[in-house]
Amino acid sequence: MSTTVVTAMGRGLQSCGTCGLLSRPMAGMDKGHCPRCGEKLSFRKPASLQRTWAYLIAAAVCYIPANLLPVLTTTTATGTESDTILQGVVLLWSPTGWPLSLIVLIASIVIPISKIVALAYLLITIHRGSIESYEQRVRVYRTVRFIGRWSMVDVFVDTFTAALVQLPPFMWVEPASGLVFFAAVVVLTMFAAESFDPRLIWDTAVPGGTRDG
């Protein structure tokens, strides 16, 4: 018994990413505008895979100096000391400060690399035309979108610390070069998640389905 897979694209319907309205473009046109909000519509995001790969590779490159270079420089009467993200996690770890240390560890190291690996997994399975675990890959994508909103926690903590601890000439804290690379990782992974079109996951379920925007 054969099962026919029905998709919106197969029926010539386009979903608006702004208001969610499902509509049909005018006859003879591949693209249209949402009749409700006027947003430009397309069956798939243009060049979704290429743009996502570009942002993802750039984020992976920036991730290395973000963790190797110092993110904060502390100057006191005894001298100047610079700390990387991991060193900051160790310094914050104490009987009372471990929750903040754990937040910085998850937000600064675990979440960025998890987003990079998860998006790379989705892109590779789409390129390979995988026909398995559709629901699992959609859950991975939704998780990436959900945790992405917490990616700026560490940038906020470092910036807040630098603004709060200013007691010249006894002590002051300044952001270091590693913080720039970390912010770049956060922004680039956000762009990668936004550029990725999750509908591409399901295209292999349809004979002749497209793999690109």
Image (cartoon, grey):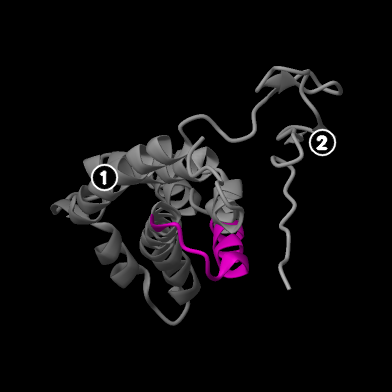
Residue 163 seen from this side? no
| Front position among marks 2 and 1 | 2
- On the image, the x and y values in percent for residue 112 come to 40, 56
Give the quadrant of the N terminus.
Answer: bottom right
Q: Residue 191 — which label?
A: none
Residue 27 seen from this side? yes
Q: Residue at x 28, y 51 (%)?
A: 63
- Examine the rendered structure and indicate whether residue 120 appears above or below residue 40: below
Q: Quadrant of residue 113?
A: bottom left
* Residue lying furthest right: 36
Left or right of 169 in this view: 93:
right
Magenta-colored span: 128-144
Q: Secondary structure at mark 2?
A: strand
Q: Alpha-carbon neighbours of circle 1 within 10 Å: few (<14), some, or many (≥20)? A: many
Name which of mark 2 and mark 1 comes first in the sequence. 2
Q: Residue at x 76, y 23 (%)?
A: 25
Q: Residue at x 43, y 60 (%)?
A: 125
Q: Is residue 159 magenta?
A: no
Specify the amino acid type for callout 1: Cys
Of the pair 181 and 192, the residue shown nearer to us:
192
Q: Which residue is mark 1?
A: 62
Q: Residue 22 — which label?
A: 2
- Examine the rendered structure and indicate whether residue 137 appears above or below residue 195: below
Left or right of 136 in this view: 4:
right
Specify the amino acid type for callout 2: Leu
Q: Residue at x 33, y 67 (%)?
A: 89
Q: Alpha-carbon neighbours of circle 2 within 10 Å: few (<14), some, or many (≥20)? A: some
